[in-house]
Amino acid sequence: MNPITWATSPWGREVPIHIAWYLMWLALIAGLLFVIVHALYVGFVAGPKKFARNDAPETLAAVPERVPRHSMAARAFHWIMAASMFVLLFTAFLPKAGIKFNWVAYHWIAGLVLTVSILFHIVHASFFMDFWSIWPDRIDLRDARRRLLLAVGKDAPLPDRFAKYPLENKFYHAVILLSGLAVICTGLFMMKRVNTGGLFTRNPYLFSDMTWGMMYVLHGLAGVGLIALIVVHVYFGIRPEKLPITRSMIFGWMSRDFYLEEHDPQRWAVPDNAASTKKRGYQASDAD
Amino acid sequence: MAVIRDVMPAFDLLQPGAAADAQKLLQKHGEDAWAIAGGLDSFDWLKDRIKKPKVLIDLSGIDELKGIRTTAGGIEIGAMTTLTEIAEHPRIRDDYALLAEAVEHVASPQIRNQGTLGGNVAQDARCWYYRDGWPCYRAGGNICYADTPVGRNREHAILGASRCVAVHPSDSAPALIALDAQFVILTPQGERIVNAEEFFVGPEIEITRLNILRPGDLLTAIRIPSAWAGAKFYFEKVRDRNVWDFALMNVASAMVVKDGAIDRMRIAVGAAAPRPLRLKAVEDAVRGKPANAATGEMAGRLAIQGAVPLQFNAYKIPLMRNLVKRAIAGVEEAA
């Protein structure tokens, strides 16, 4: 049950060549187990969400019916990345699961699409969005502690509502960022090993066997990690209480009621230009 | 690499007397089992200790897998029938001379006496990096040692390569494709019959196998329909040593000519790609045309479209073009 498959190189050295493929089943099972445990917890154990509220009347009055959440560019990035991620996972793991097809070209092309979309996202998020909105802040950590204490029946002040993104969302983003960067960085080098129709000049001796082996292992570990992460992401995307967020990733906006229920206008302010479009509501906002 | 040569690793030897029993044993032992027919490919692997099966299933005692039978639709050849029997069989020599000629070109008389048709089509790749136990793609690794600027790839593929560039070494396979043969496979789910060209699989689909046989599967027979019996056949094998060697390339074709024009044709080449390659585009292009040098020239050029040579095998492109040309026009006319 070694999680890494080893081989003897032509020079007699033991080198890793890739992960053991049972890890993909392990990741799938881990993802599904999380889904089951979470669904049971929410269904039978967790109480209703409680937040501290102190919205000023003028703040409430400024919130439009449709609160812009994701700009067209952000949504396009998300769905392009999602499509490429699914292509990558299916082309990587279906052949290992026994469904054989010509997968290599589809895999690296989807990998390039993912790479370009991530590069776009990095630039877009760094210079055209509120870069820090996706990273945990002090209030997130304070409120996480409060929520934990309340969940286990201890006394604690009510937590504030979320900023643009809940803490769990921020952690998920951080983990998928690490996994994504790992598969992209290793994947780009791995394209030097295969025939990409002249896009990359093949050079399988760019690194030593050990370095190449570690690269394949890292690529595989991040890849199977993404199986679990995507299972969890899709699960949250279709949970009833999360559907307004999912819909906002399609249409760009969320309802005023949902916004005021879950999000703190002090921490995630509605852009000024959105207030003037109260009925039609949505105007693409890259300001976040 | 510390490899002990010529001393086989220990294994359990199982000798079933029926095909169904052999299939059950293969199914029971899965990846640990190794089916041995004539043993000519197998003993290389075992003596070099590259493959170390726990169980060896010897098929030589299964009579139902041997012999050549006439059926309503043609003939059926048991997978364990030796190549010599096939080459000498009167019905095959009369009606399917293409196959007789192809198996006569396999290795040496001694090997043909021992080697079987099933073993010949199911044999493994001859790439020396792979055969030497290097962790290449075909061995489950992540590199092709042959497809590098300094790799020894003179015998490797010019078409259909995908990461692995090893070619299929069989001489009988192109002939069976040209004869539109069917392969009968006993699987855990029952009997499965596939067309010859579907039996072989390229690395883009299955990089660690050359055919569709999976653990638990047993190739039992090969059926050749009468549709091509008595057609105009052509087989040619080019090799470094004419007395005994694997093909640098081979070509097999079956052609029916009516009123001076090609009515229908099947043609396949071996050792050009990781699987024996049926040239469907050539078959379509020559239909209705005379079987002469001009048609052969056109077909040869068509056949090599998309060929990508490696560092040391560019010679295979004109070789393939000329073999296809000769298969259509005949040696004399093509010259």
Image (spheres, rainbow, N blue to C red):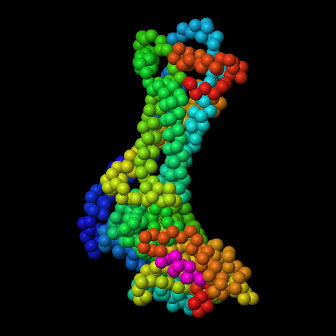
Is residue B175 rendered magenta in the image? Answer: no
**Residue A18, image x, y percentages:** 38, 52
**Residue B182, image x, y percentages:** 59, 74
Q: Main secondary structure of the magenta part?
A: helix
User: In the image as oriented, which residue stretches furthest toward the right?
Assistant: B259
Q: Is residue A74 above or below residue B282?
A: above
**Residue B295, image x, y percentages:** 66, 82
Is residue B319 rendered magenta in the image? Answer: yes
User: In the image as oriented, which residue stretches furthest toward the top?
Assistant: A57
At horizontal 42% and vertical 73% (from top left) the residue drawn is B312
Q: A108 or B72: nearer the eye?
A: A108
Q: Is residue B39 above or below residue A6?
A: below
Q: Is residue A109 above or below residue B309?
A: above
Q: Horizontally, is B318 left or right of B288 in the view?
A: left
User: In the image as oriented, which residue stretches furthest toward the front?
Assistant: A127
**Residue B181 visible from this viewpoint:** no
- How many numbered discs sit on the rendered protein? 0
At horizontal 43% and vertical 80% (from top left) the residue drawn is B246
Q: A206 or B10: nearer the eye?
A: A206
Segment tinted magenta in the rendering: B315-325
